[in-house]
Image (tube, grey):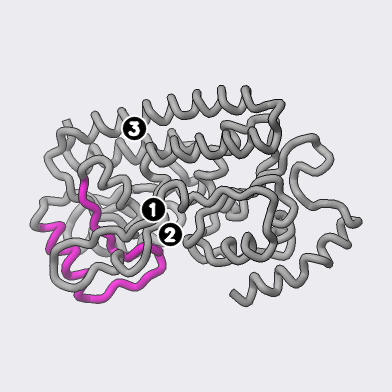
Amino acid sequence: MKTTRLAAAALALVVMAAGCTSPATGAGTGRLSVVVAFYPLQYVVEQIGGDQVSVTNLTKPGVEPHDLELTAKQVASVAFADLVFYEKGFQAAVDSAVEEQKPKRVIDAATIVPLRTTPGFSGEGTSPSTSALDPHTWLDPQTMEKYAVAVAQQLSLARPETAATFQQRADALVQQLTTLDTDFSTGLATCQRTVFVTSHAAFGYLAERYGLEQVGITGLTPDAEPTPSHLAAVQKIAQQKGVTTIFSETLASPALADALAKDLKLKTDVLDPLEGITSASRGTDYPSVMRSNLSALRTAGGCQ
């Protein structure tokens, strides 16, 4: 990406402007500097690192992460970080920065849970969700548990004297995520409807984990343009499966979801892919937004 190359070229200027010292967030604070690519990774690092880390999220609140571009300062933060946590294949600019800057320690989420294509659906037209690997692994709480283990290991390598504390926090986080997973399993076990329609196909891993079927209005990125035949197929499935609700999300336009719901005379609601937390989010952190998602799915699915 041209923007990333320009940012990388400007890295030396950033360092000079900083007086030849590291621009990493932990510099001078005694904390480990950790750079993360987007919000769910930030949540894991902050829960485990606590006051031992300073975290820089490359995707600012309210920014749609799929097409992220980096500034020279952000590229510099990657270069000087004690740890970088990202997901290769999701954000091209971050992939390039990691490859070019070669930080000390890196966790690639895609090596913890390999990305796969999201299944499409049976119907007229072709689902746009089948054309690429699905990055939205974090919407499965069991994946987040695996992230916690990896983060504790890497933070312990970076600061061995605090390893026991990192492990204790990781164990506590895994327990919280296990409870969340159980809540989803029990909450979605007996639903009248298992098909749900959402604005972009971000919920494939969640759907597979809990026995649901996702139908995306767009594909894996919310700005993809669905074909008329695809929209017709979504409408047909919604009618055949007795769908009651069309879901939009917080960081992308609800226009398509609202229009589809209006055409079909259905309700609208929010299903959050948790790519960022803003004032519009139905919760203040990963667990609370996920529980809001669970409540929305249960209502739409007529779950007992």
Is 142 on the left-hand or right-hand side of 151?
Answer: left
Q: Does 214 appear in magenta?
A: yes
Question: Does 88 appear above or below 191?
Answer: below
Of tags 2 and 3, which is closer to the observer?
3
Viewer-closest of 74 and 232: 74
Q: Residue at x 36, y 37 (%)?
A: 292
1 and 2 marks in contact (CB < 8 Å): yes
Q: Secondary structure at mark 2?
A: loop
Q: Which residue is mark 3?
A: 181
- Which quadrant of the structure image shows residue 127? bottom left
Which amino acid lies under the numbered mark 2 shown in the image of this protein? Ala
Q: Does 216 appear in magenta?
A: yes
Viewer-closest of 195 and 159: 159
Of the numbered discs in the image, which one, if any, rests on residue 252? 2
Marks 1/3: CA–CA distance:
22 Å
Query: Tag count in the figure?
Result: 3
**Image coords of residue 169 (percent x, y):** 56, 25
- Which quadrant of the structure image shows residue 191? top left
Is 232 on the left-hand or right-hand side of 13?
Answer: left
Residue 151 appears in the rendering: yes
Q: Residue at x 56, y 63 (%)?
A: 68
Q: Residue at x 45, y 38 (%)?
A: 146
Report the magenta residues as a range. 212-239
Q: Which residue is mark 1?
A: 249
